[in-house]
Image (cartoon, rainbow, N blue to C red):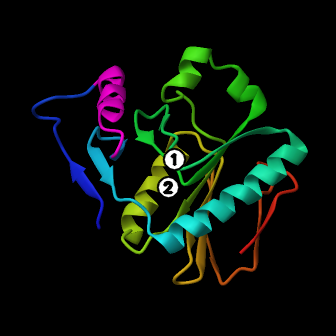
Amino acid sequence: MTTITINFNNILKLNDDQFYQLCRDNPEIKFERNIRGEIIIMPPSGGETGEYNASLIADFVIWNRQTKRGKVFDSSTCFKLPNGSNRSPDVSWIKLERWNKLTPQQREKFPPIAPDFVLELMSPSDILKDVQKKMEEYMNGGVKLGWLIDRKNRRVEIYRQRKEVEILDSPTTLSGEDVLPGFILNI
């Protein structure tokens, strides 16, 4: 299955409430909305990708339970980024102080906040160029640190605010740096 992008902008531009309602009315479909307002239909993950993503989330949850520094979110969480896009990273994390500034209503829908950290895990159906654009959107939306993990090619791209993308071939670990203090991911 492949990702499908639909551009309704010449016919209809969905506002935030309408996009939220579209997602609620179609819970079996995973929607995102890019910075241009185009609707993206995301295919479900396969077994290998889903299992690996669950393992990644577990690592983040365990670290976060120990440090109590923030909130961890899975791939079903959609964020309204400050740049206007609605995105659902495979794994994301928000510093507790920033999360607590949101109202209960903002937390309930698509939180209007850029995560401090995002992770995208390449699926066999993903096109690298498209996921790289998504990572750039995250960074332009205010994300501080992002990892794009391509298991098939044993490659990781590290995105940081206002810095060139760092590409690592066959890394054994990744550091959460100052965004996720003390977090080390074993690849």
Return the x and y of residue 34 as percentages of the image width and height.
Answer: 35, 44
Q: Is residue 51 left or right of residue 62?
A: left
Q: Residue at x 45, y 62 (%)?
A: 132
Q: Residue at x 60, y 44 (%)?
A: 143
Image quadrant in which you'd find residue 7: top left
Label count reads 2
Return the x and y of residue 166 as percentages of the image width and height.
Answer: 63, 69
Where, quadrant-wise, is the N terminus in this rendering? bottom left
In the picture of the structure, the residue carrying the numbered disc 1 is 138
Return the x and y of residue 16 as percentages of the image width and height.
Answer: 36, 24
* Residue 148 visible, this angle: no
Where, quadrant-wise, is the C terminus in this rendering? bottom right
In the picture of the structure, the residue carrying the numbered disc 2 is 135
Label 2: how many residues lie within 10 Å, few (<14), some (14-19) or many (20+)? many
Q: Residue at x 52, y 69 (%)?
A: 49
* Residue 179 visible, this angle: yes
Q: Nearer the viewer, residue 153 or 78?
A: 78
- Residue 18 is one of the magenta-drawn residues: yes
Mark 1: amino acid: Tyr
Q: Residue at x 85, y 51 (%)?
A: 181
Q: Is residue 37 left or right of residue 173?
A: left
In the rendered image, the vertical position of residue 66 relative to residue 12, given as above or below:
below
Residue range highlighted in magenta? 15-28
In what element is the residue under mark 1?
helix
Mark 2: amino acid: Met
In what element is the residue under mark 2?
helix
In the rendered image, the vertical position of residue 151 relative to residue 6, given as above or below:
below
